[in-house]
Amino acid sequence: MAKKTVASLQTSSKRLTKAIKMVKSPKSGAYTFTESVMTPEEVDAWLSKQ
């Protein structure tokens, strides 16, 4: 499973990060991408989760 953080977004008072995770389907073997926008502190926990 490959994973990476793509962009840092900054709004008025909050700093946000958009994370994209590439997940392999157990049935078909195809890869899908899961995206989420969150605070930088939550990125490592989200990426380590399966």
Image (cartoon, rainbow, N blue to C red):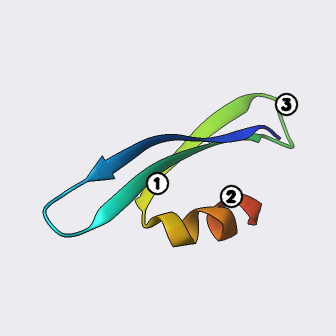
Is residue 28 something one can see in this rendering? yes
Residue at (31% x, 49% y) in the render? 9
- The residue where tag 2 is placed is 47
- Residue 25 sits in quarter: top right
**Circle 1 residue:** 36
| Lateral position of residue 33 relative to residue 3, left or right | left
* Marked residue nearer the N-terminal end (2 or 1): 1
Picture residue at 26% right of the left edge, 68% below the top = 14
The image's mark for residue 29 is 3
Q: Residues within 10 Å of mark 2 (few under 14, many from 20)?
A: some
As displayed, is residue 21 above or below residue 11?
A: above
Mark toward the viewer: 1 or 3? 1
Near mark 1 (Cα within 10 A), the count class, few <14, some 14-19 or many ≥20, is few
Q: Amino acid at mark 3?
A: Gly
Q: Secondary structure at mark 2?
A: helix
Which residue does the image show at 43% across and 67% down from the upper left?
A: 39
Q: How many angstroms separate mark 2 from mark 1 (CA)?
A: 10 Å
Residue nearer the viewer, 36 or 12:
12
| Furthest residue toward top | 30
Residue 43 place in picture, x, y as percent: 58, 62
Q: Earlier in the sequence, mark 3 or mark 2?
A: 3
Query: Amino acid type of disc 2?
Result: Leu
Q: Amino acid at mark 1?
A: Ser
Residue 35 lies, in percent from the top left, at 49, 47
Q: Which mark is residue 25?
A: none
Q: CA distance from mark 1 to mark 3?
A: 22 Å
